[in-house]
Amino acid sequence: MENISEEFIRSMVPRVKCAGCGEPYHQEDITAVSRHDDTWLVNVTCGACRVRSLIAAAVKPGEGPRPSSRVPTDLTPEERPRFTKPVDSGDVLAMHYYLDGFDGDFKTLFSPPPS
């Protein structure tokens, strides 16, 4: 390890889960690619499914992990109420009925409707 900052990055990445399979990363899955000031680029390869990802991590010197009251999201403030309401039993039942009749044709499902 070059310094305490890389050690800190390596200790934080295992808290991130693979986007492909949901497994956490391990120390051997992590390669620091570059560093510019307080920003690191880290390449991770999932040991379980082999999906590769690039993580950008910004670390201020002298700061360790701290709890965050904000959940990372790409939703706009206007979209949040629509997509952040809790899932209830009616939602689960509706999805069950939908999937029970679904034929597996994702191409048609995600194609725009004919005009």
Image (cartoon, grey):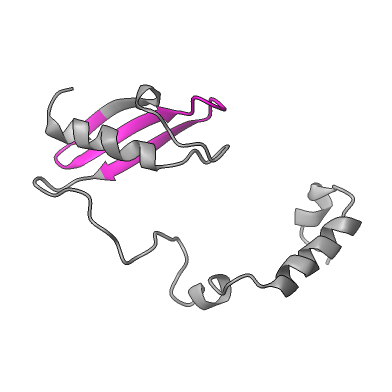
- Which quadrant holds the C terminus? bottom right
- Prevalent SS, magenta region: strand
- From the viewer's perspective, tell me whether residue 87 is left or right of residue 33: right
Per the rendered image, the range of residues in magenta is 34-57
Q: In this rendered view, identify the residue nearer to me: 110 or 5.
A: 5
Q: Which residue appears at 16% of the width and 42% of the height? A: 38
- From the viewer's perspective, tell me whether residue 51 is left or right of residue 63: right
Q: Residue furthest left?
A: 62
Q: Which residue appears at 45% of the width and 70% of the height? A: 76
In the image, residue 36 sits, relative to residue 58, either above or below, namely above
**6 within the magenta span:** no
Q: In this rendered view, identify the residue nearer to me: 46 or 57.
A: 46
Q: Which residue appears at 85% of the width and 64% of the height? A: 97
In the image, residue 13 sits, relative to residue 28, either above or below, namely below
- From the viewer's perspective, tell me whether residue 72 is left or right of residue 10: right
Q: Which residue appears at 37% of the width and 42% of the height? A: 15
- On the image, which quarter does residue 10 sit in? top left
